[in-house]
Image: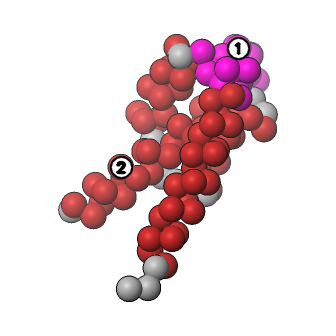
């Protein structure tokens, strides 16, 4: 089971970056984000995403607005803030550096 735990930790580590990336393109509510993540093979449950969204909002990286829905209760639409855009930009740089470093290590011949 250690492998599954390690894989889950790797996914959790990039979830913040993925959420901010999704919201940099357009505002969305949590179910839309979960659907997008799942369609990209990042398995996520509501119990993971809602605390993350709350933390990102409390840090000023996201904001939200309520919108009435014809299909049920009002929906909370999240959007990235200017502070979140800057944070996402820095995460993007770090991600590229990390991918380059890992690719170098795993493809290196001894």
- Of tags 1 and 2, the one toward the viewer is 2
**Of the pair 106 and 34, the residue shown nearer to us:** 106
> What number is the disc on residue 65?
1
In the rendered image, residue 81 lying in the magenta stretch gets the answer yes
Query: Callout 2: 10 Å neighbours few (<14), some, many (20+)?
Result: few
Measured from the top left, where is residue 7 in percent x and y?
36, 58
Q: Coloured how? A: secondary structure
Measured from the top left, where is residue 21 in percent x and y?
67, 40
**Residue 77 visible in rendering:** no
**Residue 9 visible in rendering:** yes
Q: Could you say which quadrant of the image residue 87 lies in?
A: top right
**In percent of the image, x 48 and y 29: which residue is there?**
52
11 over 3 or under it: above or below: above
Measured from the top left, where is residue 85 in percent x and y?
71, 29
Query: Callout 1: 10 Å neighbours few (<14), some, many (20+)?
Result: few
Could you give the CA–CA distance between mark 1 and mark 2, rounded to whole angstroms?
Answer: 30 Å
Assign a secondary structure to mark 1: strand
**Of the pair 18 and 34, the residue shown nearer to us:** 18
Q: Which residues are magenta?
A: 60-85
**In percent of the image, x 43 and y 45: which residue is there?**
12
Q: Earlier in the sequence, mark 1 or mark 2?
A: 2
**In percent of the image, x 38 and y 85: which residue is there?**
110
> What number is the disc on residue 52?
none
Q: Could you say which quadrant of the image residue 91 lies in?
A: top right
Assign a secondary structure to mark 2: helix
> What number is the disc on residue 9?
2
């Amino acid at each position: 089971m250690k492998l599954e735990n390690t894989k889950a930790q790797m996914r959790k580590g990039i979830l913040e970056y993925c959420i901010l990336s999704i919201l940099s393109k357009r505002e969305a509510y949590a179910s839309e984000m979960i659907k997008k993540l799942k369609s990209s093979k990042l398995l996520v449950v509501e119990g993971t995403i809602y605390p993350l969204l709350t933390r990102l909002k409390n840090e000023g990286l996201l904001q939200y607005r309520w919108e009435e829905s014809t299909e049920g209760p009002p929906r909370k639409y999240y959007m990235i803030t200017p502070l979140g855009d800057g944070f996402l930009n820095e995460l993007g740089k770090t991600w590229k550096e990390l991918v380059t470093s890992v690719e170098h290590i795993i493809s290196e011949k001894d």
